[in-house]
Image: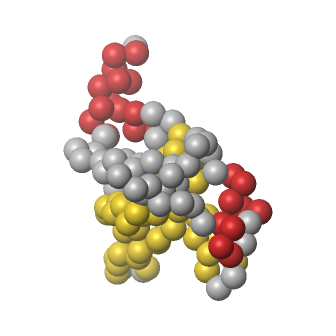
Amino acid sequence: MNEIIKNIEAAELKAEVPVFNVGDTVKVYAKIKEGNRERIQIFEGTVLKKQGGSNRATFTVRKNSNGIGVEKTWPLHSPNVEKIEVIRRGKVRRAKLNYLRDRVGKKAKVKELVK
């Protein structure tokens, strides 16, 4: 039974998934359906967390929109996620950045990783 589930999950995986980590600033190109039309909407923000594995992997992105924090969680291998573009790499020491929810302004920034 386990082999059958693994085969089904492997068929659902995307061929190419970009490499990004927690703390990175990313642009998520998401497909939005409105009636019979479909368009792509860009959501740019900081990756707060990544969790799960295989085709169940999800990631959460947070941005500040008009002074209000907005978070969205997407499945990594979803067909509704067109592409993920990494804008800048962040230097963090934690796996989950939940503390950013309480911060406003410059304190909510993540340092940039310099290589």
Total count of labels: 0
Q: Position of residue 43 (x, y in %)?
A: 47, 71
Instruction: Please identify the quadrant where the N terminus is shown.
Output: top left
| Displayed quadrant of residue 13 | top left
Q: Position of residue 29 (x, y in %)?
A: 37, 68
**What is the residue that sits farthest to the front in this orientation?**
115
The extreme bottom residue here reads 66
Residue beneath the point at 40% across and 38% down: 55
The front one of 32 and 36 is 32
Q: Residue at x 30, y 32 (%)?
A: 10
Residue 73, visible in the rendered structure: no
Q: Can the viewer see residue 57 in this picture?
A: yes
Rendering quarter of residue 40: bottom left
Residue 73 in the image: state x and y as whole percent: 55, 56
Q: In the image, is residue 91 above or below residue 94?
A: below
Along the viewing direction, whichever of 31 and 15 lies nearer the viewer: 15
Q: Is residue 13 left or right of residue 42?
A: left
Colour style of the rendered protein structure? secondary structure
What is the residue that sits farthest to the left in this orientation? Answer: 15
Q: Residue at x 40, y 15 (%)?
A: 2
Residue 59: image location, x then y, percent? 51, 50
Q: Left of 28 or right of it: where is 10?
A: left
Q: Residue at x 66, y 66 (%)?
A: 108
Q: Quadrant of residue 28?
A: bottom left
